[in-house]
Amino acid sequence: MSQRVLTTEAGAPVADNQNSASAGVGGPLLLQDQHLLEKLARFNRERIPERVVHARGSGAYGHFEVTDDVTGFTHADFLSEVGKRTEVFLRFSTVADSLGGADAVRDPRGFALKFYTAEGNYDLVGNNTPVFFIKDPIKFPDFIHSQKRDPFTGKQEPDNVWDFWAHAPEATHQVTWLMGDRGIPASYRHMNGYGSHTYQWTNADGEAFFVKYHFKTNQGIRCLSSEQAAELAGKDPNSHQTDLLQAIERGVHPSWTLYVQLMPAAEAADYRFNPFDLTKVWPHKDYPLQRVGRLVLDRNPDNVFAEVEQAAFSPNNFVPGIGPSPDKMLQGRLFAYADAHRYRLGVNHTQLAVNAPKATTAQNYGRDGLMATNSQGRGAKNYEPNSYDGPVETGRPLSAPLAVTGHTGSHEAPLHTKDDAFFQAGELYRLMSAEEKSRLVANIAGGLSQVSRDDVIEKNLAHFHAADPEYGKRVEEAVRALRED
Ligand code: HEM
C-alpha cells in the first residue's frame, strides 16, 4: 500500500515538513512557504474559551433503553415504549477548576446528558448531587467567583469560599453533601447522576406531573478520602478520564439505572416545602423512586476537542412531553447555556456533529453566521410563512402551561410551611454513620479553620448548629482545635 501524502489544508502535497523554506541555506524564511505559515497560524488558534464552569470533563456515547412503562406520565417519544433505545452522549465534569485541573478533587461532578431523540435533542444537564448551593440564579456569578481563583491571588481562597457560604444559609445542605464521603467520587463510573431540578412531564391527555431524575450507578458508589484524593491528583491528574476511557476501550461499559420521582402537579402548591427549591430533596417516602430505564456508555469519542470540548448542552433543549418547572435556578439556566455556547463556540455550534440532532433533522429559517454549513436544502426559503412547502409550526406546546399568581417583583421563593434552610442538612447529617460523621466534621474543619476572619467562621458555625446541635458542636470543637495548633 502506498503511503498517504501529507497535504496543506487546501489539499496540496507538502514537500518538506521538517525544514522551513529559506532564502539560501542560512537565510531568512520565505513568506511563500504556505505550509509553515498555515501550521504556525493554526497552532495559535487551537484553543477556544474554556467553559466558565465545568471546564474540565470527559465524554462518551451510548444509549438509553426504556425498561418500564411511563406513558401515563409523559408522551415523550423516546420514553414511549418499553425496549425503545435512544442514542446518547454524556459529558462528566468537575466544576471549579480550569481545564488543566486535576480530576480527584472535592467538588461536585457534572452529569450532562444529551438524548438524540426522534423529536429533537433533549439535554438533561445535571450533577452528581441531588441539590445545589443556592436557589436563585442572580447569585450564581457571585457564588462561582467565590469558589474559583481569586482575581488578585490567582488561587482558590478559603476566605472567599467560606465567606460566600456564611452569607448563604441555604447552602448548608449541599455543603454537608460536598464535605461528606460522596464529595470526592473515585471515578465518573462510580457515582450517581441527578437532574437535581424539578422538571415537568406532560402525558398524552395533557395532565402535568413534576419530576426529579435519579441515575443510580450500576458500578456501585466508590469514593476517595481527602488523603487518597490528594495523592491520586498528584500521581494522575487525569484519573477520571483515564478510568472512563480505559473501561470503555476494554469493553467494560458503565451503566446507570434511571429512576424518577413523580408529583402530580396539583400537589405542588400545598407540599410542606417548596418543591421547586433546588436546595432540597423530595423524601422518597413522599414520592418513591419509579424505574424508567437503563443508560449505557459504550463508545469513546474519536476526538476529544471536536466532541467533548465542543459539546454544548442546554437545559432549554426540551422535547414534547417534557418542560421546565418554575424552579428559579432552572429558569436562569434556560438562558445561560445557549448564551455561553454562542460565545464559546459561535452561533452555528448546533451544526457540529456532537450537537446536531441524529434521529431527526433541524428544519428552520435560521441562516448564515460564522461557520455556517447547513443550507437547509437547495433554494429553501429563509422566511416563514411562505408558499413553498417550508417547515411550519405544530401549534402544540411541548409541555403543559404553568399556573402563575401574584405581582411582578423581586420575590423570595414562596414560603411553604417548612421552607427553612437547615432541616434537610440536619437530616443528612443524622443519616450518616459515626465514621462518616467524623470524616465530614474533619473535612469541614480542615477548610473552615483556614479562614482568616472570626466573624466568617462564626456565621458558618451557626449554620451547622442550626442544622443539628451536635453537628454544630463537633465542627466548632474541631475548628477550634485546628486553630489552636
Ligand atoms: C456548565 C451556568 C447551575 C450543571 C455551565 C456553563 C454555564 C453554566 C454558563 C458553561 C456552559 C458551556 O460553556 O457549555 C449556570 C448557571 C447556573 C448553573 C447560570 C445557575 C443559575 C447549575 C446546576 C447544575 C449545573 C444547578 C446541575 C444541576 C452544569 C453542568 C455543566 C454546566 C453539568 C457542564 C455541561 C457540559 O458538560 O458541557 N453552567 N449553571 N449548573 N453546568 Fe451550570
Image: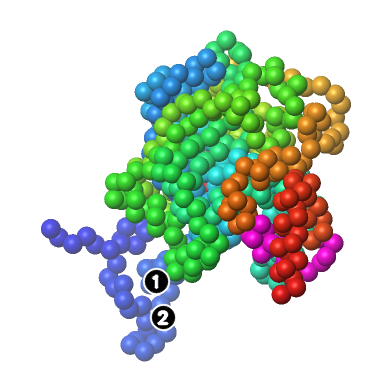
Residue at mark 2 to residue at mark 1: CA–CA distance: 10 Å
Do tag 2 and tag 1 residues touch (Cβ < 8 Å)?
Answer: yes
The chief SS type of the magenta part is helix
Magenta-tinted stretch? 441-456
Q: Is residue 307 toward the left or the right of residue 339 in the image?
A: left
**Which mark, by number, is residue 428?**
none
Q: Is residue 41 toward the left or the right of residue 9 in the image?
A: right
Nearer to me, 454 or 107: 454
Q: Position of residue 285 (x, y in %)?
A: 61, 27
- On the question of residue 479 being in view, the answer is yes
What residue is drawn where x is 55% and y is 44%? 128
What residue is drawn where x is 74% and y is 70%? 483
Q: Position of residue 329 (x, y in %)?
A: 70, 39
Dot 2 corresponds to which residue? 29
- On the question of residue 141 being in view, the answer is no
Q: Residue furthest bottom?
A: 26
Label 1 is placed on what type of residue?
Answer: Leu
Residue 332 magenta-drawn? Answer: no
Mark 2, secondary structure of its residue: loop
